[in-house]
Image (tube, grey):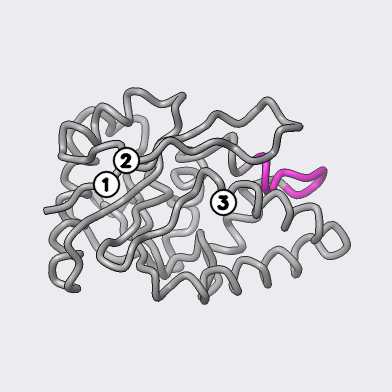
């Protein structure tokens, strides 16, 4: 079992894991008639830039199979990520682009950004057969070392209020809740509010 940067060839293992990290949010933004959220994630994973691009992700591999995935990025990456996702939305949804983009903008109220001194963690998914085995902890410890090597002093992430088990894991590692975030779109009842958590070392 080892941790490495994601590659395009990992797409079929990674997409279900990325999707599992935020099913309601991904469906809210990208689910539209014939185009499913997983279809969009698949296409964007193979692109060079975007919030679910392979370029941002790390994976845990065991016996040739990806069993966990996580994205990690800095403030300096945000412009390319935003531009990449906008281009991917336009390419896939065409005349539905304004609706999907508006939903993506609404979601920014519960998807916070890294600070200048930290890296941000997102799209954190572990295969169901490998949960509760310490893999998530190992992956976050790896990202801690990666952050330190890059000159950062912390990690941040967002956790749904509907995911107390996930929040408990992060708190055991050292993360603390620093902000309550409220979903912006008042017309939908599907999206829980969130919490921003930070871990400085």
Name the residue furthest right: 95
Q: Residue at x 65, y 27 (%)?
A: 190
43 and 113: which one is in front? 113
Q: Position of residue 50 (x, y in %)?
A: 54, 67
The residue labelled by disc 3 is 108
Name the element at disc 1.
Answer: strand
On screen, 111 above or below 131? below
Name the element at disc 2.
Answer: strand
- The earlier-in-sequence mark between 2 and 3 is 3
On screen, 4 above or below 30? below
Start and end of the magenta stretch? 27-35
Q: Position of residue 4 (x, y in %)?
A: 25, 63
Per the rendering, the mark at residue 155 is none
Kindly indicate whether the residue at mark 2 contacts the one at mark 1 (C-beta within 8 angstroms).
yes
- Asked whether residue 31 is drawn in magenta, I would say yes
Q: Residue at x 60, y 74 (%)?
A: 83
How far separated are the C-alphas under marks 2 and 3? 17 Å
Kindly indicate whether the residue at mark 3 contacts the one at mark 1 (C-beta within 8 angstroms).
no
Which quarter of the picture shows residue 75? Answer: bottom left
How far separated are the C-alphas under marks 1 and 2? 7 Å
Q: Residue at x 38, y 40 (%)?
A: 179
Query: Mark 2 packing: few (<14 Cα in 10 Å), some, or many (20+)?
Result: few
- The earlier-in-sequence mark between 1 and 3 is 3
Q: Residue at x 35, y 51 (%)?
A: 69
Name the residue furthest front: 179
Q: Mark 1, mark 2: which one is toward the viewer? A: 2
On screen, 61 above or below 117? above
The residue labelled by disc 1 is 198
- On the rendered structure, is 106 left or right of 134? right
Q: Position of residue 132 (x, y in %)?
A: 23, 28
The residue labelled by disc 2 is 178
- The earlier-in-sequence mark between 1 and 2 is 2
């Amino acid at each position: 079992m080892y941790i490495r940067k994601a590659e395009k060839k990992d797409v079929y293992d990674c997409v279900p894991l990325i999707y599992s990290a935020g099913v309601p949010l991904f469906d809210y933004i990208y689910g539209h008639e014939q185009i499913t959220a997983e279809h969009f994630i698949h296409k964007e994973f193979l692109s060079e830039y975007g919030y679910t691009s392979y370029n941002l992700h790390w994976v845990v591999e065991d016996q040739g199979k990806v069993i966990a995935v996580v994205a990690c990025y800095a403030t300096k990456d945000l412009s390319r990520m935003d531009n990449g996702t906008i281009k991917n939305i336009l390419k896939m949804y065409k005349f539905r682009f304004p609706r999907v983009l508006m939903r993506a903008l609404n979601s920014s109220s519960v998807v916070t950004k890294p600070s200048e001194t930290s890296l941000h963690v997102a799209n954190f998914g572990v295969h169901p057969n490998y949960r509760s085995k310490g893999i998530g902890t190992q992956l976050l410890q790896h990202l801690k070392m990666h952050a330190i090597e890059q000159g950062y002093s912390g990690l941040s992430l967002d956790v749904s209020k509907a995911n107390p088990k996930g929040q408990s894991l992060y708190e055991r590692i050292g993360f603390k809740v620093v902000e309550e975030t409220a979903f912006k779109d008042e017309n939908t009842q599907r999206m829980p509010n969130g919490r921003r958590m930070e871990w400085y070392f």
